[in-house]
Image: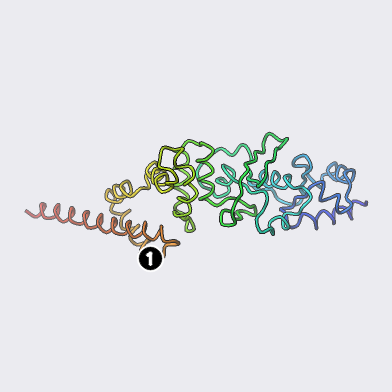
């Protein structure tokens, strides 16, 4: 195949998947391995990994390595087709999902994916976890299918990640508008007994993680009461913004009460000091 035709074929092929394509996808367009080798040699395409290339004119980004790994897990199917599945068969999870969601600071030196059936990888940088996910547990982040923050946190607990690290992730995740505390408790329920709580008591395990993150109500009350500016800011934000779910609504209403109490306490303290100054 001529260079011009091959490049046009590859450009069309990669237009919907971050400028990337696989050897198998190229072959389906009659672009041979010899064509790819010639184009790589001329600098028109860049080899990113075994069987995965990027057009030289397409920019890379911070998610490139994970995108490459995901494409390689099903190299014949186009990304747009895979994303169109009712439930994608390969979903970024664990530390990889946390990294995509920008929650926590876990090292993502290996690409973690959840798949519905047992699967092994010959590549040491890819790890598979077998689990039957539900549609509500999967979302798309930066163009890649990933477990939701709630499912991600539960998976990290399931993988016996240090709970203080999981708590750090939770402290960031809970600030996201769509985070659902009820769903987190449901996902944690099967892990409660293993972590020293009653069987299926996901709420107790969730409460423990909140305490470690200092996001439980007593810790928040202390923080709010100690900083008047913080309590006033929280009061303004929470009362102005509708809560995204019932659990968060209850949480927010208690924070409102704590904020009001903290503001009132700070005002009384100020009034006392002013009164003493005028005596």
In this rendering, position of residue 104 left or right of residue 252: right
Q: Position of residue 167 (x, y in %)?
A: 44, 42
Residue lying farthest to the front in this orientation: 199
Q: Position of residue 238 (x, y in %)?
A: 37, 61
Question: Of helix, strand and loop, which one carries label 1?
Answer: helix
Q: Around disc 1, counting alpha carbons within 10 Å, would you say few (fewer than 14), some (14 to 19), or many (20 or more)?
A: few
- Judge by depth and name the residue closer to the eye, 136 or 108: 136
On the image, numbered disc 1 is attached to which residue?
Answer: 240
- Judge by depth and name the residue closer to the eye, 258 or 163: 163
- Judge by depth and name the residue closer to the eye, 88 or 256: 88
Q: Position of residue 273 (x, y in %)?
A: 14, 52
Q: Position of residue 56 (x, y in %)?
A: 77, 48
- Is residue 97 positioned above or below 256 on the image? above
Residue displayed at 85% across by 41% down: 41
- Judge by depth and name the residue closer to the eye, 82 or 1: 82
In this rendering, position of residue 271 left or right of residue 14: left
Residue displayed at 44% across by 38% down: 195
Residue displayed at 42% across by 62% down: 243
């Amino acid at each position: 195949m001529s260079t011009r035709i091959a490049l046009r074929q590859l450009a069309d092929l990669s237009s919907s998947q971050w400028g990337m394509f696989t050897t198998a996808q190229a072959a389906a367009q009659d672009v041979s391995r010899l064509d790819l080798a010639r184009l790589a040699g001329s600098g028109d395409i860049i080899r990113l990994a075994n069987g995965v290339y990027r057009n030289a004119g397409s920019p890379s980004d911070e998610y490139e390595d994970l995108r490459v790994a995901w494409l390689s897990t099903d190299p014949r199917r186009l990304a747009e087709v895979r994303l169109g599945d009712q439930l994608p068969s390969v979903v970024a999870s664990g530390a990889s999902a946390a990294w995509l969601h920008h929650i926590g600071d876990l090292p993502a030196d290996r690409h973690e994916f959840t798949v519905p059936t047992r699967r092994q990888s010959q590549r040491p940088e890819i790890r598979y976890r077998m689990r039957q996910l539900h549609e509500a547990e999967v979302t798309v982040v930066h163009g890649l299918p990933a477990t939701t923050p709630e499912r991600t946190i539960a998976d990290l607990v399931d993988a016996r990640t240090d709970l203080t690290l999981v708590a750090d992730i939770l402290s960031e995740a809970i600030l996201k508008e769509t985070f659902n505390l009820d769903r987190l408790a449901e996902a944690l329920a099967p892990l409660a007994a293993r972590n020293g709580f009653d069987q299926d008591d996901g709420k107790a395990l969730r409460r423990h993680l909140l305490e470690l993150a200092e996001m439980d109500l007593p810790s928040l009350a202390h923080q709010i009461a100690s900083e008047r500016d913080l309590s006033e800011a929280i009061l303004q934000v929470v009362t102005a913004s509708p809560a995204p779910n019932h659990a968060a609504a209850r949480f927010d209403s208690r924070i409102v009460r704590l904020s009001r109490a903290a503001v009132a306490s700070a005002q009384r303290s100020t009034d006392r000091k002013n009164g003493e100054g005028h005596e």
